[in-house]
Amino acid sequence: YTKASFVFNPKHVFHTKRQSAMMSQEEILVSLVQGRDGKAWAERQQTGWSVYSKEPACTWTGIQCDSMDRTTVVSIDLSGTKLEGTIPPELEKLPNLRVLALGSNEIRGNIPSQVANMPNLEKFNVSDNFITGTVPSFASRLLNTVDLSKNRLAGPLPEDFGTNHDRIMLYDVMKNILTGTVPGSVRDMEALETLSLSDNHFSGLLPTGLGMLQNLKYLYLDDNYFVGTIPADLARVQGSLLEEVWLQDNRLSGTVPVAFADSSNLLDLYLDGNKLTGKVPRDLCRSEINSDFFWGIPEDEGRDYCDSIACPVNTAAFEGVFPCKPCTDKYFNPYLGRYGDCIDLNQGDILRKFYEATSISGAWKGDVNWADESIHECRYTGVICDNSGHVISINLQGRGLTGTIPEEIGFLQYLQVLNLADNQLEGFVPSDLRWAPLQELDISGNKLRGIIPPGLCLKPNVNGNGDRGDYNCARFACPIRTYSSTGWYDGDTSICKPCYGNMPYLGQKVCASSMARGTVKGPTLSKSLVPIFVGVTAFVVVMVSIGLASLVHKIRTRRREAELVGMSPNKIGVSSLPGSETVDLNSRYRIDNDDE
C-alpha cells in the first residue's frame, strides 16, 4: 500500500482492551486520522501517518522520539497543520508522551479523561480549536504548559487545578465560556509565570494569594465579571516580578492599591472599565507604564501619565484611558476609567434605559405604559413619586421582565424601594445600586448569578442591613445553592437554607431538588462568603471622547495579538498572549454613602 492509496478504515484501529494493549505506536498515532478529512490530511504529510507506512513512527511528520532509545514516542506536535477530528483516548497508550500540541487546527469534541490522566505530560496545547466540554484535572505533576485558549470550553475550573502542579509556568484558558470563581488552589502553582483567564464568564472575587506567587509576571484577568476590590497582596511591595496586569472590563470596586507604585518591573497596568473610585496613585503615574497609549503623541510637558492607566473621575474616554474629556452638566460618573458616555442623571432617561434593558424578550406582562413617551415617568406602571416629582419607589414584581438590571437604575438619587422579584432577569447584580438611598430591595426569584457585590453588602439600612452591626450579603439575596421563603435573609424567620440540587441563581425561594437539610442563618453565611472590604472616600464624574481614542483600541488589540507575530515581551512562548477634578458626592448627588 502506498500513502496515495491509503484509505483509513476504523477496523485498522483496535478498540477492545485486549487489542488496544497490543497496539503499536503507529496504530495509536493513526487514531488521530479520522474520516475522509483525516485521510486527506494524512496524504498531505511528508512522511508516515498510515498504519501501512514503512517508515517508523519516529520519522513521521510532527513526531519526536526519546533521544536515548530513539524508538519511544515522546512528542506529538501537529500545530497548525489543519488536522480535523477529535482527541482519541487511545493516546493514553503512549505512556511516555511528554508533549501533545494540536493547536490551531479543527479539533472538536472534549478532552478525554484518559488523555488528561497521562502521567508524564509536560506540555498540553490544544489552543485555537473547537473543543467543547469542561476543563479537566490533569494528573501529570510534570506539566509546565497548559494552553486551552480559544475554544468552547464551559463550566468552572476544577477546584484542584493548581494542586500538585507546582511546575506549571503557563496556564491559559482565555476566550472560552468558562464560569464560576477562580479556585484557591491557584496559590499552589509556585512556578507560574503567566496566568490568562481573559474573555470568559468568571465571576466572584479575585483570588487572594496571587501576589505570593514569586514568579508571576503576566496576569490577564480582563473581560470577566469579577467584583470586589483588588487584593492588596497582588501589589507586593518587595520582590514583585509582575510586568503586565490586565484587569480591565470587570466590575471591580474600591481604590487602586498604592503598592502598585513599588512594582519596579511593571509595564502594563490596565484597570479601565471597572467600578473603581478615588484616584490613580500619583507615584504610579510613570512614563514607562502603559507607554503604548502615547505612541505617536508629541511630547508635552502637561501630559498626565495617570491618564494612561485610567481616566480620572469626572472624565471619560472611548476606552477609559487617554485622551480623557470631562463630563458635561447633568451627567455623572463616580468611576475611574469610564468607557463611553458619562451617566445620564435625568430620571426619565434612566427609566427608559431600564425598560429597554429589561424587555429583551418583548413587552412586560399586564397593563404597562412604560413604552408610551407621552406619559410622565411618575405615571409609569409601578412607579411612585414624591410631591416634588422624584421617583422614590419602583414595584415591578412578576411583570415578566427579561434581560439584565442596568447600572443606571442605581443613579436614581431618591429611590427608596426597588422590587424586581419573580421575573426572568439574568446576569449579575450591579454594584451601582449602592448609590441609591434604598431602604427596600427585592431581587428574589430571578436568574441572577454570581454574588452580591461586596460594596453593596456594606450598604446600611437596606432590608435591615447593618442592624446591630450585622452587615450581611444575605440581606439582599440568598447565595447560590441556598434558598428561603422570601429569597433573602430578614434577620428573623426567613433564613437562607442549603439546597443540594442545581441552584445556580441568587435569591431563590424554593429548593428545586427538595433535598434541603439543615439551616444556615444569614450572618453565618456572610462570614463565609463576604470578606472585609475597604470603603471609598472621594468620587467624581466622567465623559467620552471619540477622536484620538480609537488609537487606544488599536494599540491594545495589537498588544494582545503581538505574541502571534513574535513581538511580545512575554518570553515563555505563549501562543495567544502578549506577553482629576473631584467633587463632593454627597453634596452633588445627595447620597449619604460611606460604603464601597
Image: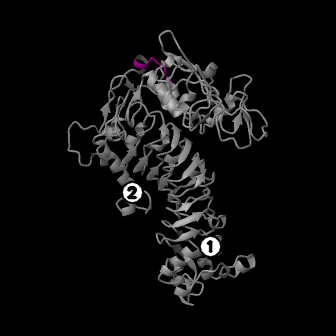
Q: Is residue 371 above or below residue 90?
A: above
Residue 289 seen by the camera: no
Label 2 environment density (alpha carbons within 10 Å; few <14, some 14–19, many ≥20):
some
Distance CA(mark 1)–CA(mark 2): 32 Å
Camera-side residue of 175 and 384? 384
Q: Which of these two is toward me, 15 or 421?
A: 421
Main structural element of the magenta stretch: helix, strand or loop? loop
> Is any atom of residue 70 visible in this view?
yes
For the residue labelled by badge 2, is the local secondary structure a helix, a strand or a loop? helix
Q: Are marks 1 and 2 in contact (CB under 8 Å)?
A: no
Q: SS for tag 1?
A: helix
- What residue is shown with label 2? 561
112 vs 501, left or right, is: left
Q: Amino acid at mark 1?
A: Leu
**Nearest to the observer: residue 364 or residue 17:** 364
Label ID, residue 393: none
Quadrant in which residue 510 is drawn? top right
Q: Amino acid at mark 2?
A: Glu
- Looking at the image, residue 82 lies above or below residue 155: below
Q: Quadrant of residue 235?
A: top left
Q: Which residues are magenta?
A: 588-596
Which residue lies at the image location 48% right of the left edge and 19% below the top edge?
375
Judge whether 398 appears above or below 309 on screen. above
Which residue is denoted by mark 1 in the rendering?
A: 91
The answer to which of marks 1 and 2 sits earlier in the sequence is: 1
